[in-house]
Amino acid sequence: MDDTSERVVENPIDDDELLAQIAWYYYVDGLTQEEIGGHLGLSRIKVSRCLDKGRRTGLIQVQINSPYEGSLRLGRALVERFGLADARVIPSLAGAPRGARIGQAAAHFLGRRLVVRDLLAVGWGEAVMATLDRLAPTLAAREISLVSLTGGVAAYLDGIGGRTQKGDIHLIPTPLRVSSPEFAGALRLEPYVRDVMTLALTAKIALVGIGAVSPQATLVNNGYCSASEIELFHRQGAVGDILGYFYDREGRILALDLHTHMVAVDPEHLRRIPTIIGAAAGPAKVEPILGALRGGLINNLITDEATAQELLNRRD
Amino acid sequence: MDDTSERVVENPIDDDELLAQIAWYYYVDGLTQEEIGGHLGLSRIKVSRCLDKGRRTGLIQVQINSPYEGSLRLGRALVERFGLADARVIPSLAGAPRGARIGQAAAHFLGRRLVVRDLLAVGWGEAVMATLDRLAPTLAAREISLVSLTGGVAAYLDGIGGRTQKGDIHLIPTPLRVSSPEFAGALRLEPYVRDVMTLALTAKIALVGIGAVSPQATLVNNGYCSASEIELFHRQGAVGDILGYFYDREGRILALDLHTHMVAVDPEHLRRIPTIIGAAAGPAKVEPILGALRGGLINNLITDEATAQELLNRRD
DNA sequence: GCTTTGCTTGTTCATATGCTCACTTTGTTG
DNA sequence: CAACAAAGTGAGCATATGAACAAGCAAAGC
């Protein structure tokens, strides 16, 4: 009776559980994929595929326990120059899709900060969605609750829809932008909306995207702003937006008419959250990031090498 | 000018930092070792060795973000049977040294629970030392402070000596056992000793070893007890010890003369700490673990398959 | 009933990886 | 300064791994 093969017949263990078992054998015990296969009654290739899946979905994540981890050269330079709490700079690799890699880096960054049953406040934007995508298993495993900082429910659902999610999800159940200031005001005063917004500001960590003032901005692509409005904001000194609020190059929120139509937490109030993580990269994001940094709208930054270098090159 | 090779000349980056950089490229960016070598001006083999070192020292740690991670079959069974908070069961592999693997598992377990600047209370024993060994990089990276639950300073120094350690280390500056109850009592009342013990009980997490009542026990090997004393304790119903205090099969601390000679936190007081992790494995540890479980002296267990199976086989 | 489509599974093979061993460097001690 | 030990380095090779491809299978559609 070969004890390596008969032990594990039992029930057709649930998928995730099997995956965790495999990951454990492989990474912690250092068994080879073939050995694991023998142990668990699977073909080597299947083990390989499970591992691949685990890595892709973020169920398996590598921790780098080094004080330097967050401060590799450029990151540290950013921290010092802009007085950030921490920064993560990912290498600018030619072939890889930038969005996904920023998301992965942000997920990794958050993975080290989120505690079991934590509450994470999330803003709006592509980078945020990419991050949530990679973060899903962590969120489930640690029973993290999410709370949105802005309206625009549909967009959020894309990012987190269909996933196993053990914590609660508190969405602001409104559009991001509505047709009149009065309507926006009324919505903001709705008890449920207020409650979610209040809850959001109790989070210890917030993750926000940083939008560019350009006709290609996600706000435009999603129909929340027209290209001509963007042009107008640009004339008025806007260099970027956070949570749909535009600010100038010093990071001061502008007094735009648009803002009165928004249903979202005011970036000024956001400051009550101790850790505000901004994620963005690319040439178009340099000015927006700079503004956000100068105004202290964020205190943690995830970006890539090229962008970081550009940020550091600017002489204020 | 090939930008992949000239970028990284700069300073002869400190070792850990280089390692972190390599780990990042390899695990997060998925570059091959050869590519990393080119990027950083190192030979492929050197990159390979760095990674190996990182894994061995625990600087690189794999997270398995699954609710099942802690509850793989046997673990879950233990949790249910003994009302534990959590349990980790490692596979019993023939060739591997058990102590080191228990240590690794415990380090991994703790890695998911320790928060930045946390305080970890540690007991005494081989398993604890093995764990601290593997945990060192995590401790440094998260600025974890350590506080000892027992005297016996020298032994602790072995486990943590020479490592980079960013948090504080609070040792109880006494032997584990002293010659008279009076002397032990006096030491326990020494302000500094009292302070450390009080501090220890404020920790959220404690890690303790579980000793067997046998002539091979670590307590004997280190000269704290004689084999004949052990024999005597055995006759009096002792099945195991925690922090140098022996208990019976129901986990009740015995009224042994020895205990009055000890300078260590009382396991009864230990209960104030919400998470008490016991680590031990091997046939000799079955009875000791059972006692500790029955008496609720620990509420988290790290052990191996064979031991877990044996624990579950016992009908109370 | 048959086909189509999409998914899972296993095979083959190129590649990535880690190990062994001989060699070099570095630091230490007489 | 020489001699030696200890750690570090690189080449070659066996092994582990992942990707491309092909076969099998099940559900959906005609």
Image (spheres, coloured by chain):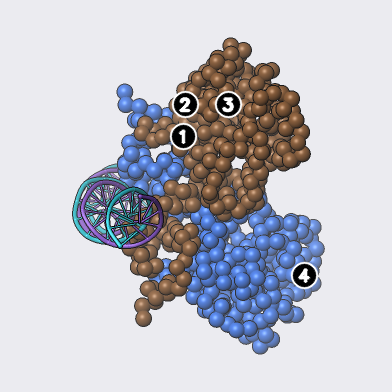
Chain colours: A blue, B brown, C purple, D cyan
Residue for badge 1: B99
Which amino acid does the dot numbered 2 rest on? Answer: Gly
Q: Quick check: B152 above or below A178?
A: above
Residue for badge 3: B224
Q: CA distance from mark 4 to mark 1?
A: 66 Å
Dot 2 or dot 3: first in sequence order is 3
Q: Is residue A261 left or right of residue A212?
A: right
Residue for badge 4: A183
Q: CA distance from mark 4 to mark 2?
A: 68 Å
Q: CA distance from mark 4 to mark 3?
A: 76 Å
Residue B247 visible, this angle: yes
- The chain to which mark 3 is attached is B
- Of residues A168 and B227, which is closer to you in this image? B227
Which amino acid does the dot numbered 3 rest on? Answer: Tyr
Closer mark to the observer between disc 2 and disc 3: 3
Residue A206: where, in percent of width, then height? 66, 61
Do dots 4 and 3 share one subunit?
A: no
Pointer 2 with pointer 3, Cβ within 8 A = no
Residue A264: where, in percent of width, then height? 71, 67
